[in-house]
Amino acid sequence: MVVNVQRDFYATGKLVKPSDLSLGPQRCQPNPQSTDTVIFQISLQDCGNTVQMTQDWVIYSTNLTYSPTSSIPIIRTNPAVVPIMCYYYRHGNVSSKAIKPTWLPFSTTVSSEERLSFSLRLMTENWSGPRSSTVFQLGEIFYIEASVDTQNHMDLILYVDRCVATIAPDVGSTPSYDIIADDGCLVDGVQEDSSSAFIAPRISLDNLQFTVDAFRFLGADVSLIYITCFLRAAAATQVPDSLNKACSYNKATKSWSAVEGPSNICQCCETLTCHATGMLPPAGGRSRFGRPRVFGKREALDEPNIEGETVTILGPLLVTGPKQRDVALAVIKEESAPVELWLMVAIGCLSLLVVLACAVFIGKSLRKS
């Protein structure tokens, strides 16, 4: 693990002391250096780093800690703790050599055997494409897009039945917070300080967009957030009802409204009793937030009520305070860092050559005159 930290830690022009920076619970010190960058280079198992294993990932976690010291009774900067996580795909080969990422950043895609593919992506503010960063400040908005790729399947409509936020990739971990609940009720929009809502109308039946105001868990030591969503595709002929809906809360009218269908299908969102008001799915149909079950075109054509569904995870998202954003960005090590270093060296050499050429030209001109 290599972590580069700019000594201008808060981007204020004030350089921090390298001795005030440490890595991991064992407070490992940085490499000796004399530049404006503090470098940590350790093994993944060093410094008290923790390791977590999920079905698809091996995750090494540590913290960069800044603890300002002073020889006088006051300090002029704040301490900080920045979480750092390294992800290794369990189904690939891991070695000391660099591995070129092959996944799409900040999104998840799950495909069925019949090539019914779901995705959950973090988008830019104008919905023009995927967002390039997962670092947010409080007061900003998550723009989230769910979709299903029908390919050769019949026309389908996508629903987001539930989304839950956690500070760990495990959806069953605590603390947790429901953003969408009870078959498509965007319950986060009810909160007084929230403007979360589904985007209506849809751009297409197989696509559903919604916004969520950025937040952090109260009392959490880290500000990483994972958002797990339960996506479901039904036949496009499905009539909207209490089990097939996308409902947002309107604070102005103090009522719920549906992206499709009459607003009365959202009335159950007030008491979160939507599943109790509808008919239970048939045997062999949708499993309620358990193991995903996906069905292909042939079954969907024969049984219009049979659906495809999956569970996708968006994250980790890093939510910071206004002054911590620059700290988080300063310690993120981009894959392009070596390329940028060589580019700076090349530009410096080229500039030096231009200066030398100008000096020679001026010297010759002076001799002639």
Image (spheres, helix red, strand yellow):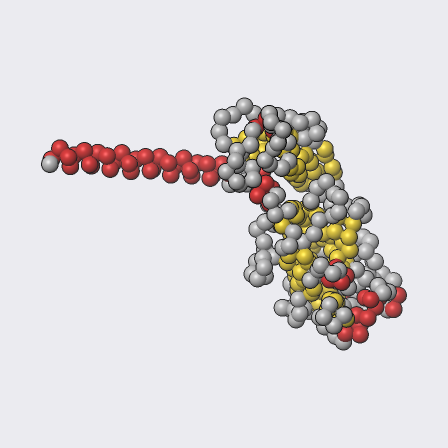
Residue 294 visible: no
Residue 277 in the image: state x and y as whole percent.
Answer: 87, 69
User: Which quadrant does the N terminus fall into?
Assistant: top right
Q: In which image quadrant can residue 168 be found?
A: top right
Examine the rendered structure and indicate whether residue 160 appears above or below residue 236.
above
Q: Residue furthest top?
A: 32
**Horizontal arrangement in the rendering, residue 77 relative to residue 296 (left or right):** left
Q: Nearer the viewer, residue 256 or 18?
A: 18
| Residue farthest to the front, as pictured | 73
Determine the residue located farthest toward the left in the rendered image: 369
User: In which quarter of the view is residue 213 placed?
Assistant: bottom right
User: Which residue does the image show at 57% across and 43% down from the upper left?
Assistant: 326
Residue 159 location, x and y as percent?
73, 64
Q: In percent of the image, x 69 and y 44: which residue is there?
A: 223
- Which quarter of the rendered picture does the C terminus lie within? top left
Which of 147/182 is in front?
Answer: 182
Q: Nearer the viewer, residue 254 or 264?
A: 254
The residue lying at 63 percent from left, 68 percent from top is: 203
Q: Nearer the viewer, residue 201 or 190?
A: 190
Instruction: Say which residue appears at 74% left-offset and 51% top-offset.
Output: 165
206 up-or-down from 321: above or below: below
Residue 192 position within the rendered picture, expressed as x and y whole percent measured from the top left: 74, 61
Identify the image quadrant of residue 23: top right
- Residue 51 is situated, as x and y percent measured from the top left of the image, at 72, 34
